[in-house]
Amino acid sequence: EAQLVESGGGLVQPGGSLRLSCAASGFPFSTYSMNWVRQAPGKGLEWVALIFSTGDTTLYSDSVKGRFTISRDNAKNMLYLDMNDLKTEDTAMYYCAKDPWRQEGNRGQGTQVTVSS
């Protein structure tokens, strides 16, 4: 059974930075494309970023492009999201998810990111 455990969230001021981590187990991590998705209070899930299994291709939503960087370490079964120049609208619960990210059971429990002064 796939397990995904996110960490690294917290409270940060606008303009600040955070690094989210996701520890994966129970499935062949290095063969899956991986995603970060988020859910703001009162809103639906929003896809944020994707990285292919080999790490050589990344894609981002327009809302985070140029500010967030997704990366992975297949030797350690780890996924990362470096977030810079954070804005109040980035406040959300952040989840790592294996493809397909919308499928129930493919996401972790999440880590809360709050951007506020």
Image (spheres, rainbow, N blue to C red):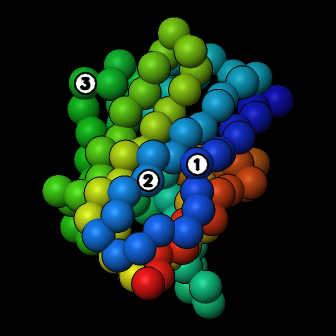
Instruction: Determine whether label 1 and label 2 are within 8 Å by CB.
Output: yes
Which type of secondary structure does the marked residue at label 1 adopt?
Answer: loop
User: Residue at (70%, 48%) from the top-left corner?
Assistant: 108
User: Hey, what amino acid is under mark 1?
Assistant: Gly
Image disc number at residue 18? 2
In terms of depth relative to the viewer, which is nearer, 104 or 91? 91
Residue 38 vertical position relative to residue 50 in the rendered view, above or below: below
Tell which residue pokes out farthest to the left in this image: 66
Q: Earlier in the sequence, mark 1 or mark 2?
A: 1
Q: CA distance from mark 1 to mark 2?
A: 7 Å
| Mark identifier at residue 56 | 3
Q: Quadrant of the N terminus?
A: top right
Q: Is residue 67 above or below residue 13?
A: above
Question: Pointer 2: residues within 10 angstroms few (<14), some, or many (20+)?
Answer: some
Q: Amino acid at mark 3?
A: Asp
C-alpha gap between disc 2 and disc 3: 23 Å
Task: Identify the mark nearer the N-term, 2 or 3.
Answer: 2
Q: Which circle marks residue 8 in the picture?
A: 1
Residue 63 appears at what percent x and percent y? 27, 71
